[in-house]
Amino acid sequence: MVSRLVLILGDQLSDDIAALREADKDSDIIVMAEVMDEAAYVPHHPKKIAFLFAAMRKFAAHLEGRGWRVRYTRLDDPENAGSIPGELLRRAGETGATEVLATEPGEFRLIAALEDCPIPVHQFPDDRFLCSHAEFEAWAEGRKELRMEWFYREMRRKTGLLMEGDKPEGGKWNYDHDNRKPAPDEITFGGPMQFAPDETVEEVLALVEDRFGGNFGRLRPFWFATDRGQARQALRHFIRNALPEFGDYQDAMLDRNRFLYHAVISMYLNAGLLGWREICEAAEDAYRAGDAPLNAVEGFIRQVIGWREYMRGIYFREGPDYTSRNALNHQRKLPGFYWTAETDMRCMARAIEQTRDEAYAHHIQRLMVTGNFALLAGIDPHEVHEWYLAVYADAYEWVEAPNVIGMSQFADGGIVGSKPYVSGGNYIRKMSDYCNSCSYHVGDKTGDKACPFNYLYWAFLHRHRERFGKNPRMAQMYRTWMRMSDEKRQATLESAGAFLDKLSKGARV
Ligand code: FAD
Ligand code: DLZ
Ligand code: SF4
């Protein structure tokens, strides 16, 4: 007798997922489904879709191997209902199940769809995270500013990671000061571990090529891990070969190196193939064994138990309207080159090309190149949000939206960041070698050949002087702007205006 279905979504591929813990192997049936509603609500990168479908298929087989009964729907199943609630209803009809056990999805859109499902769906908290919604609420309650750093310290204390009793390892909570080195000439790390597609993956690749071949992004070569064993290998590879340098070059960018010393594990972590604890413990073990320095390990752990958990807390605290916020009233359409990489700005072209090829860009490329440009150019943050949600293999709203709407676009009015992350070309010149082969001149501030980031930066500050002019963290920038001669300011604003006109007309920039 079957009474319950157990829903496992594409980013819930963990043995210890809450809904499974609540389920009974003897009487319950697991439902997993590849559906168009999930695969097409934004035009996901083909690598992201292929990764999830292949990992879902392998996880379903893994569960069957452990004695679970699984009803798995492939995208090309003629009976496919096309949506998660539709599949639940279909499977309920087939099996006579009258209720569903689920783990809370990572997007309000899908939480609402499950709430509205005609058969009752019990959504259990997703406790694969370190910080529950209630715990984040309690931390945030009554605070004027939700600073990540304070939250992070709580998480360090809670986990005991890099702690000596109640003191931080080495005496400091944060070693970021040591982590801002420009890229060296040579990177000794050969990049993330790559996996040749097996039969399951090849089958999925053929399906994705056929159904999603027109989406932005290259499907092949496909090299992602697609099961937990492979994801663990990728993690070990990073810890052994890249973690020691991760800290030093965390913010650096190189024209001919896409991964530098980054872990490239966020897609595995967010889909459930890896857990935050094993990742952080592996990093801490490397430190304790003397294989990786404290600045690297602390920096890495901060990203995982600090930033990642904090972003999730913000998303669920702020609510479903978060993705439509637009505090700076930016209305420009997303330029076409975000989908083609056809721009003369070398940094933008390289970041977008690598996004197209790998469904991956590292943090500083996302924040200080593509994000910075969108903010400076006044692009509608919702369009920016939809682009990021579509193009990165690790993107789900709970983590993408606070990073884009909050950290990158300041569209939440300053909840995530106390000031906007904007910079002129000089930051990119310092942290990368893109400018060496750019047709714009990073040293020029105005005129046709000047780096657009330079004049757009000042034009942004000028445009938003009412809002930011009194922000003490931006006072120095405004003083510099006001110290410029009237002619120089005028020429800067004219260069910005001419560039934005070209952008509006769809001309190549
Ligand atoms: P590493 O640089 O090696 O860092 C290790 C891990 O720390 C990552 O795997 C990730 O799990 C975590 N992490 C680091 N920074 C963040 C952060 N700001 N927020 C959450 N987790 C973090 N990350 C996503 O997982 N999904 C997204 O959709 C996403 N969108 C982003 C959009 C913008 C505009 C920005 C600025 C950042 C975004 N990030 C997102 C955060 C970060 O860029 C990625 O987590 C990171 O680039 C993943 O690559 P990695 O595994 O090599 O990370
Ligand atoms: C992202 C995604 C895609 C592309 N396809 C599916 C799918 O076919 N079936 C599924 O269960 N999940 C998919 N996902 C992941 C969901 O969109 C994700 O669970 C929600 O966005 C909540 O994080
Ligand atoms: Fe980017 Fe400007 Fe450097 Fe060109 S000159 S790569 S546009 S920062």
Image: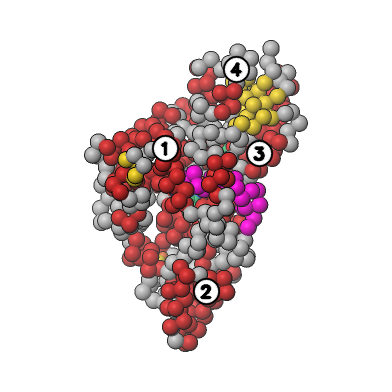
Q: What stretch is highlighted in magenta?
A: 308-325
Q: Distance between the residues labelled 3 and 4?
A: 23 Å
Magenta stretch mostly in which secondary structure?
helix
Which three-letter amino acid code belongs to the residue tagged 3? Ile
Left or right side of 1 for 160: left
Whichever of callouts 3 and 1 sits on the residue coming sooner in the sequence is 3
Where residue 420 sits in the image (x, y, percent)? 50, 63
Find residue 3 and report its image quarter: top right
Whichever of callouts 1 and 2 sits on the residue coming sooner in the sequence is 1
Q: Residue at x 36, y 51 (%)?
A: 174
In the rendered image, which residue does mark 2 sit on? 469
Where residue 126 sits in the image (x, y, percent)? 56, 34
Whichever of callouts 3 and 4 sits on the residue coming sooner in the sequence is 4
* Mark 1 residue's CB less than 8 Å from ligand 1: no
Quarter of the image with the N terminus in it: top right
Whichever of callouts 4 and 1 sits on the residue coming sooner in the sequence is 4
- Is 455 rendered above or below residue 18? below
> Is there CB contact under 8 Å for labels 2 and 3?
no
- Look at the numbered disc 3 and give the secondary structure of its residue: helix
Q: Distance between the residues labelled 1 and 2?
A: 40 Å
Q: Which residue lies furthest to the left in this view?
A: 290
Whichever of callouts 2 and 3 sits on the residue coming sooner in the sequence is 3
> Is there CB contact under 8 Å for labels 3 and 4?
no
In the rendered image, which residue does mark 3 sit on? 111
In the rendered image, which residue does mark 1 sit on? 159
Q: Which residue is drawn at 59% across and 69% down?
A: 504
